[in-house]
Image: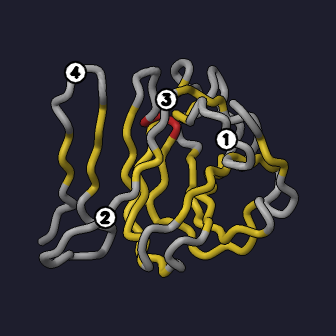
Amino acid sequence: LFYHVYRRSNLVGDQIDYRLTDVGEVTGYGSYTFPSLTYDTTRTMSTTYEAIKFTASGTLLQGVRFQIQSSATLTNPLATLTFHIYTDNAGVPGTLLTTIADTVPYGDLSATTKTILLKCSTSLTDGSDYWLVMQQSAAPTGGNIRFIASSAVATGKYATATTPTTWSTVNNL
C-alpha cells in the first residue's frame, strides 16, 4: 500500500503544498531542483494560454515553482490549469517539449497566494530560453486567475494566446 506524500507550510498568509510523489510512482532517495518563477506583481490571466519565459540553468528541468491565486472563489471548481514546457521560437513559445502531469483545479485556488511546485523531468539546453505555459481548461467564472509576475521592464518575458500556435508578447507589466 502506498500513499502520496504532501507537506504543507506553516507560514502565515502563504499556502504552500509540496507534492512529493507522482501518481503511480514510488520515488527513491534523491533531491529535485525547482527553479523559482516568483516575482513581485500580480498578472491576471486574460486568455486561454499564458506563458512565462525562463532561461535554463542546467540540462535537466526537474520541476517549476511559481505563485498563483484567484481574485475570488471560482464557481467552476472542477476546471483546471494544465502546465506545459515549450521551446523558444524567436521570442514566443515554439515546440511543446512536455506536458506536466500535475494540474491545479480551480477549486484549489483562493485570494491567498499559493506557491505551486510542479514536478517533471525534461531535458533542456543550459543557457537556452524556454516557456512555462499555463492552459485554462475553461474560462474561470466568479473571478479571475492571477499569477505573480515581475514588474521590472520585461520585454518579451510573457506571452498570451487563444490557441497554442499564435502568440502575442506582453511587455512591461
Label for residue 154? 1
Q: Is residue 38 left or right of residue 7?
A: right
Look at label 2 and name its amino acid: Thr
How far, Cα to Cα, is label 3 from label 1? 13 Å
- Asked if marks 1 and 2 touch (Cβ < 8 Å), the reply is no
Q: Is residue 164 visible?
A: yes
Q: Name which of mark 4 and mark 1 comes first in the sequence.
A: 4
Single out the mark in the foreground, 4 or 1: 1
Q: Position of residue 41 (x, y in %)?
A: 54, 26
Residue 7: horizontal and vertical position, in percent? 18, 47
| Spatial separation of the CA atoms under disc 4 and disc 1 | 30 Å
Q: In 3D space, how far apart are the residues under numbered discs 2 and 3 (Cα atoms)?
A: 22 Å
Counting residues from the start of the chain, the first of labels 2 and 3 encountered is: 2
Spatial separation of the CA atoms under disc 3 and disc 4: 18 Å
Q: Which amino acid type is shown beneath numbered disc 1?
A: Ala
Q: Which residue is mark 3?
A: 40
Q: Any mark on residue 66, and which? A: none
Give how far apart the Cα atoms at labels 4 and 2 are: 25 Å
* Distance in Å between CA atoms under marks 1 and 2: 25 Å
Q: Is residue 59 left or right of residue 137?
A: left
Disc on the earlier residue, 3 or 1: 3
Disc 4 to disc 2: CB gap under 8 Å = no
- Characterize the local packing of mark 2: few (<14), some (14-19) or many (20 or more) Cα atoms within 10 angstroms: few
- N-term-proximal mark, 4 vs 2: 4
Q: Secondary structure at mark 4?
A: loop
Quickly name the residue at label 4: 12
